[in-house]
Amino acid sequence: CKDIQNSACQIDALLVAGDIVENGFQSEYDSLTDDLIDITKVDNYIICSGNHDIRIRDYEQSTQRYYDFMNNLNDKERAIDNIWYEYEVNGYSFLVIGSDEMRFEDAYLSDAQLEWLDERLAAITSTGKPAFVLSHYPLKDTHGLPNTWGTSLWESGTIGSQSDVIYELMNKYSNVFYITGHLHTGIGQYTYEEIGNIHGINVPSIGITNKDGDYNNAGTGVIL
């Protein structure tokens, strides 16, 4: 937060690829809000939910705390009341997706969410512009998985059993950037890869030391 506030330039948007808090406690959200709310160098906050945000407490309670957190950071006209939503910055669309039910490590996307994602990707990419999809969870066999999760099980560390469905949906379109976290990998060979037609970007963890990268320090982010 201090690095962002000390930036020499104004930042159009701060993206966080999930796991905002550790256990979904209100006190955790309050603490982070206190750190973020006074940053004047950020114009927009685009933050998706991760498994730590929804996996322990009642799902309705967890998601409401996430909505309140987001709505405290952004302008009132940007208010959200759904785990999946679209956020536009300077004419570019960010599609935020998340789990429609409580899961411990993976996610479940409802038919309604998948239909919405398909429709919005079709509309956005038809203009020739890129579409940015922000999700906590990577697709299977990407960004060094399953090895970067420390297991041989293909589902571990991924978005889950719907991975192929979500891949096929996004792969139909050009200029789709799929931005994820979850793996706690540092900056290095697993940060970017081409996944069919999809540009996969896996960002490091901010709060803990990362692994499997060339640069693994905590407090690491990417400025574009």
Image: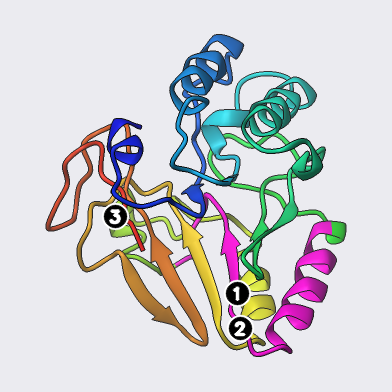
Horizontal and vertical percent position of residue 63: 72, 30
Identified by mark 2, the residue type is Asn
Task: Say which mark, if any, is on residue 148.
Answer: 3
User: Which numbered mark, 2 or 3, is in the foreground of this view?
Assistant: 2
* 133 inside magenta stretch: yes
Foreground residue among 128 and 183? 128
Q: Is residue 213 above or below residue 65?
A: below
Horizontal and vertical percent position of residue 103: 64, 37
Q: Are marks 1 and 2 in contact (CB under 8 Å)?
A: yes
What residue is pinned by disc 2? 171
Among the two numbered marks 2 and 3 on one chain, the one whose residue lies closer to the N terminus? 3
Q: Measuring 55% from the left and 37% from the top, which residue is drawn there?
A: 51
SS for callout 1: helix
What residue is pinned by disc 1? 167
Q: CA distance from mark 3 to mark 1?
A: 19 Å
Q: Are marks 2 and 3 in contact (CB under 8 Å)?
A: no
* 103 inside magenta stretch: no
Identified by mark 1, the residue type is Tyr
Q: CA distance from mark 2 to mark 3?
A: 23 Å
Among the two numbered marks 3 and 1 on one chain, the one whose residue lies closer to the N terminus? 3
